[in-house]
Image (spheres, rainbow, N blue to C red):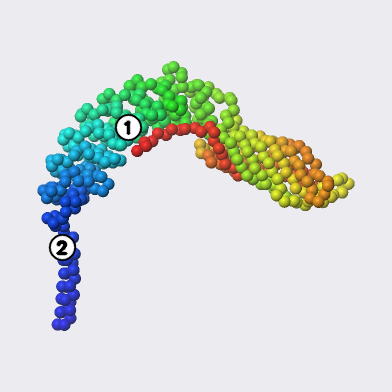
């Protein structure tokens, strides 16, 4: 019996605690402040509870109440897709076009979350169909970027401004092309969208289509008589952008419609060399592009390296100028010993003298590279070259000086070259008359400074 009593006491204790906690979580809307009522309205609207929203409004909550971030109850309900809450708020006088700085209006929030029914209702109730956010992005631009065909059609039925652009010059048509929504693009063109509207960098929808590799768009814009020869602020045509982004199908298509033969100068071939995309050059020539013969100097290299053999080690720096048309590297180097090394000098008749030598050299050279792996961001291969050395030095503790002289030094090696830098491993033949092997192993690590920067202009939105 005692055990049963203990169990009942414990059960009663925890039951009371549970009931107290439950009662404590229930909000008494009759006793809370006006500020708390407004806050609860925003929270309840964001959860989609239309019944409680109506009750709170009846208790005096402000229908235009906002959270600390400035977002209103209507904005939350529109974003969440809660149609009944939206109707309740609008019926009670919610500001249908309100939005704070840096946020979306109720209709734009509904569009970005693909809530067609809410968009339809807000438009019916008089929402501004051309309302623009802080970056001048309109509901139609959002709907076109997301590819929501039905919402785009609905907005067009309400006669929204089809050619309005945002802060960056992007129109609804541009965004539909950029994000590859051809059904939306065609709908916009059918309803009067300007096919040659240009953004702040003078990109047109046709240029977007060329760089993205979509031939269906090429055909579509040709039908609407788009200017196929338009160039952006970087002086790139649609053909140039197709080359820069390796869109081979578009290159062939553009050549077919190039009735004025304007695309195929020697510029596309030059761009192919500059982007390390030499595999595309035969296609360009097949399509009538002229060859490019002049050297193309693209970047400077700055490197630090070592030159070693069995007896000594030299350290030095190299400055080079890389040429990409013929794959040449012109360089100048300075190498020196940081400490003296013991060497033997042959004076003939098996007579050798030993000295402690410090030696340096400066050089001018040229290397020819042969790519084995060739990608746009990295290349690997072998090279061979010839250098003119001028070497000089002194012997520690001796009035005798080593011979200063010029000499030709051939080299051969392996390289890895990327956008930021690379590495060269080479064997060179430099006979300093040490009485040991003239073959030296040279390692160079370097970084690049590109002064022929190619903007591929893969367009993306700034929002």
Decide which of 387, 372 is in the foreground and name it: 387
Question: Does any portion of residue 101 appear in the rendered image?
Answer: yes
Q: Quadrant of residue 204?
A: top left
List the single residue furthest toward the right. Answer: 349
Q: Is residue 250 left or right of residue 421?
A: left
Question: Dot 1: few (<14), some (14–19), or many (≥20) neighbours within 10 Å?
Answer: some
**Does 301 appear above or below 40?**
above
Residue at the (20%, 29%) spot, across then down: 158
- Give the mark nearest the N terminus, 2 or 1: 2
Q: Quadrant of residue 322?
A: top right
Task: Give SS at disc 2.
Answer: helix
| Residue at image mark 1 | 166
Instruction: Tell me the quadrant of the picture where the N terminus can be found.
Output: bottom left
Decide which of 109, 178 is in the foreground and name it: 109
| Residue at image mark 2 | 23
Residue at the (29%, 28%) spot, across then down: 164
Q: Is residue 167 left or right of residue 339?
A: left
Figure label count = 2
Q: Is residue 212 left or right of residue 331?
A: left
Question: Does any portion of residue 81 appear in the rendered image?
Answer: no
> Residue 74, position in %: x, y?
20, 43
Decide which of 119, 451 is in the foreground and name it: 451
> Residue 373, position in %: x, y?
55, 39
**Gap between marks 2 and 1, in whole Å?**
52 Å
Question: Dot 2: few (<14), some (14–19), or many (≥20) neighbours within 10 Å?
Answer: few
């Amino acid at each position: 019996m005692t055990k049963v009593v203990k169990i009942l006491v414990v059960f009663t204790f925890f039951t009371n605690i549970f009931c107290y906690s439950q009662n404590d979580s229930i909000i008494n809307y009759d006793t809370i402040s006006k500020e708390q009522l407004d806050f609860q309205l925003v929270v309840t609207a964001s959860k989609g509870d239309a019944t409680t929203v109506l009750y709170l409004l009846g208790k005096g909550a402000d229908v235009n109440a906002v959270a600390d971030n400035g977002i209103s109850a209507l904005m939350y309900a529109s974003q969440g897709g809660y149609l009944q809450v939206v109707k309740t708020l609008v019926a009670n006088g919610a500001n249908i076009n309100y939005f704070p700085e840096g946020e979306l209006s109720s209709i734009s929030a509904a569009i970005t979350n693909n809530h067609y029914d809410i968009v339809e209702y807000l438009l019916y109730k008089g929402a501004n169909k051309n309302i623009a956010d802080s970056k001048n992005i309109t509901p139609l631009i959002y709907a076109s970027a997301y590819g929501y065909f039905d919402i785009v059609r609905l907005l067009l039925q309400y006669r929204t401004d089809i050619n309005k652009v945002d802060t960056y010059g992007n129109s609804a048509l541009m965004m539909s092309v950029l994000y590859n929504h051809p059904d939306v693009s065609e709908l916009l063109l059918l309803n009067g969208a300007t096919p040659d509207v240009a953004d702040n960098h003078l990109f047109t929808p046709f240029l977007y289509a060329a760089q993205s590799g979509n031939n269906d768009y090429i055909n579509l814009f040709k039908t609407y008589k788009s200017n196929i020869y338009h160039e952006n602020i970087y002086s790139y045509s649609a053909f140039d952008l197709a080359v820069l982004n390796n869109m081979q199908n578009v290159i062939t298509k553009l050549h077919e419609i190039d009735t004025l033969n304007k695309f195929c100068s020697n510029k596309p071939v030059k761009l192919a060399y500059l982007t390390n995309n030499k595999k595309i050059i035969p296609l360009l020539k097949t399509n009538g592009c002229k060859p490019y013969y002049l050297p193309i100097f693209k970047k400077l290299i700055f490197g630090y390296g070592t030159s070693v053999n069995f007896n000594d080690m030299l350290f030095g720096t190299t400055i080079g100028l890389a040429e990409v048309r013929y794959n040449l590297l012109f360089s100048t180097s300075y190498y020196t010993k940081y400490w003296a090394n013991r060497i033997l000098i042959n004076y003939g008749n098996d007579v050798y003298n030993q000295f402690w030598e410090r030696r340096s050299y400066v050089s001018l050279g040229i290397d020819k590279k042969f790519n084995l792996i060739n990608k746009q961001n990295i290349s690997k291969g072998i090279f061979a070259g010839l250098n003119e050395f001028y070497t000089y030095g002194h012997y520690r503790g001796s009035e005798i000086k080593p011979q200063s002289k010029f000499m030709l030094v051939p080299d051969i090696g392996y390289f890895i070259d990327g956008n930021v830098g690379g590495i060269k491993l080479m064997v060179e033949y430099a006979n300093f008359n040490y009485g040991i092997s003239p073959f030296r192993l040279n390692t160079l690590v370097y970084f690049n400074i590109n002064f022929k920067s190619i903007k591929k202009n893969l367009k993306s939105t700034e929002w």
